[in-house]
Image: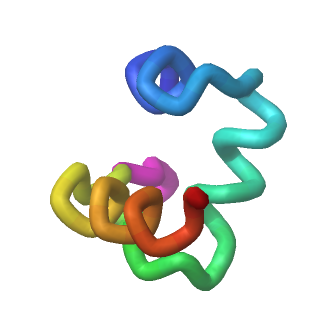
Amino acid sequence: MKELCLYLGVGQTKARELIRGNNGFGVQIGNRWYANKKELDRWLEKNTA
C-alpha cells in the first residue's frame, strides 16, 4: 500500500478507495490487496488529462 501511495501521490485512505474500486487494477488475494502496475498505468493514462 505504501508503494501505491507514493506512486500516486495520495494518502492511504484514497489509495484503498481506488484499489478496491471497480478500476480493473486492484486484485485481492486473501485479505491483501495488490495493484497490477500495467493495469494501473493504463488506468492512469485513460483517466488523466
Residue beneath the point at 69% across and 46% down = 16
- Measured from the top left, where is residue 36 in percent x and y? 25, 58
Viewer-closest of 14 and 46: 46
Q: Main secondary structure of the magenta part?
A: strand
> Which x, y percent locates residue 20?
63, 65
Asked which quadrant contains residue 47, the reply is bottom right
Please say whether residue 38 is one of the residues in the magenta stretch.
no
What quarter of the picture does the C terminus occupy? Answer: bottom right
Residue drawn at 67 percent across, 73 percent down: 21
Q: Is residue 1 left or right of residue 10?
A: left
The x, y position of residue 29, in whole percent, is: 34, 63
* Number of numbered tags placed on the structure image: 0
x, y percent for residue 14: 78, 41
Read off the magenta span.
30-34
Q: Quadrant of residue 7?
A: top left
Residue at image x 76%, y 55%?
Answer: 17
Give above or below for 28 relative to 9. Answer: below
Residue 29, relative to residue 24: is it above or below?
A: above
